[in-house]
Image (tube, rainbow, N blue to C red):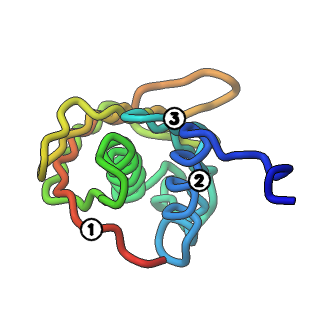
């Protein structure tokens, strides 16, 4: 009977890992972070606009933008690490480029260096309004690999 079960591909396993971490109880699931794609060293995530994520002026709060960049960068580095390892942030640098006034945010992260203990990701964050993306932030995330925690 088990022979009839479809086997999970490496690509599917990577996406499942990123989704498991993102959708587990905690900040990323509470704010509504969505995994758009995940492959080794590359992750794309999005976040829809909602009142609790905005400043009084209606723009996405900078902390929300930083949180999305941090999580996407962590996903990119984690997917480039050996199985059983998980990347946790040790430094986050965010440069804000424009106000984020769209209906959603999209973060595209790629691992630019992954060593035996430290990894670095570059993340571009854009605000999406009426099908048009406007860059709103760029981040560099430095992470340390640890043993994967039980979720």
Q: Position of residue 50 (x, y in %)?
A: 63, 59
Q: Nearer the viewer, mark 2 or mark 3?
A: 2
The residue tagged 2 is 16
Q: Position of residue 150 (x, y in %)?
A: 43, 78
Q: Residue at x 61, y 43 (%)?
A: 12
Q: Position of residue 133 (x, y in %)?
A: 54, 24
Q: Earlier in the sequence, mark 2 or mark 3?
A: 2
**Which residue is more in the foreground, 46 or 63?**
46
Q: Quadrant of residue 136?
A: top left
Q: Quadrant of residue 20?
A: bottom right
Q: Nearer the viewer, mark 1 or mark 3?
A: 1
The residue tagged 3 is 127
Q: Is residue 101 visible?
A: no
CA gap between label 1 and label 3 equals 34 Å
The residue tagged 1 is 147
Secondary structure at badge 2 equals helix
CA gap between label 2 and label 1 equals 18 Å
CA gap between label 2 and label 3 equals 26 Å
Q: Residues within 10 Å of mark 2 (few under 14, many from 20)?
A: some
Using the image, determine if residue 41 lies above or below residue 66: above
Q: Position of residue 19 (x, y in %)?
A: 57, 56
Using the image, determine if residue 21 lies above or below residue 113: below
């Amino acid at each position: 009977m088990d022979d009839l079960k479809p086997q999970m591909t490496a690509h599917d396993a990577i996406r499942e890992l990123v989704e498991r971490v993102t959708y587990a109880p905690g900040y990323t699931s509470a704010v509504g972070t969505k995994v758009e794609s995940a492959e080794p060293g590359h992750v794309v995530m999005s976040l829809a606009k909602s009142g609790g994520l905005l400043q009084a002026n209606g723009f996405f709060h900078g902390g929300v933008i930083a949180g999305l960049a941090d999580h996407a960068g962590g996903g990119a580095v984690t997917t480039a690490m050996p199985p059983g390892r998980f990347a946790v942030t040790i430094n986050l640098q965010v440069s804000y480029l424009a106000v984020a006034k769209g209906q959603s945010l999209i973060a595209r992260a790629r691992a630019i260096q992954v060593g035996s203990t430290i990894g670095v990701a570059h993340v571009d964050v854009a605000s999406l309004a009426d099908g048009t993306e406007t860059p709103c932030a760029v981040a560099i995330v430095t992470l340390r690999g640890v043993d994967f925690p039980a979720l």
